[in-house]
Amino acid sequence: MSGPGLNVPRTDPRWPALRRLRPPAFMLVNVGIINIAYALVMAAVLQGWLPAPADFATSLRGQTEWEAPLKVIGSIVAGSLTIIGAWSAFSLRRWGLVVVGAATAVITPTPVCFVGFPFALWMLWVLSMPEVRQHFT
């Protein structure tokens, strides 16, 4: 099997769990990367380093002095937790961290939460299966 995480033969008892976990985990890694990229673009617009449409820039600058930077930091932390959780799913480790990673794909303070919602539900559904959960260390 190619891809990140464990490389196990098809005869290994963990194979079905990995086969079910890899697609939603891969998508959550992508959601985390998009979330961090969006947060960095928000930070660049706030600092005036990037030109942006007037309504986007004024909506960011119209927030309180601490609200917009807090959203940027929160988005970077949420995106990082999403990536770390998805990466833990690839290696069947830290079930709780994988659940937190899926949850942070939804509760991020950026519009990326709409992209992450179906993949987080997919991951949580797969994680709830007893045959998948038993293989986590």
Image (spheres, rainbow, N blue to C red):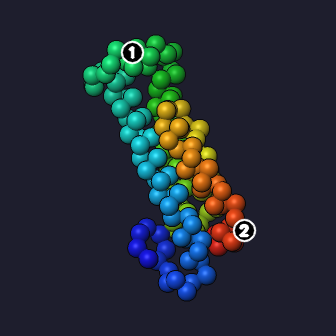
Neighbourhood count class around disc 2 (C-alpha, 10 Å): few under 14, some 14–19, many 20 upward = few
Q: Is residue 132 above or below residue 24?
A: below
Marker disc for residue 84: none
Disc 1 designates what residue? 55
Farthest right residue? 130
Q: Measuring 44% from the left and 16% from the top, which residue is drawn there?
A: 59
Q: Is residue 120 left or right of residue 42?
A: right
Report which residue position mark 2 lands on.
130
Please tell me how many numbered marks the rendered image carries: 2
Closer-to-camera residue (9/100): 9
Farthest residue to the bottom: give it: 11
Q: Seen in the image, is 2 located left or right of residue 104?
A: left
Q: Is residue 101 left or right of residue 130?
A: left
> Residue 99: x and y, percent?
63, 54
In the rendered view, would you say 40 is above or below 93?
Answer: above
* 118 lies above or below 88: above
x, y (%) of residue 37? 38, 40
Quarter where residue 34 is shown:
top left
Residue 29 visible in image:
yes
The reply to whether the C-beta atoms of the residues labelled 2 and 1 are less than 8 Å apart is no
- Give the quarter of the figure containing the N terminus: bottom left
Q: Earlier in the sequence, mark 2 or mark 1?
A: 1
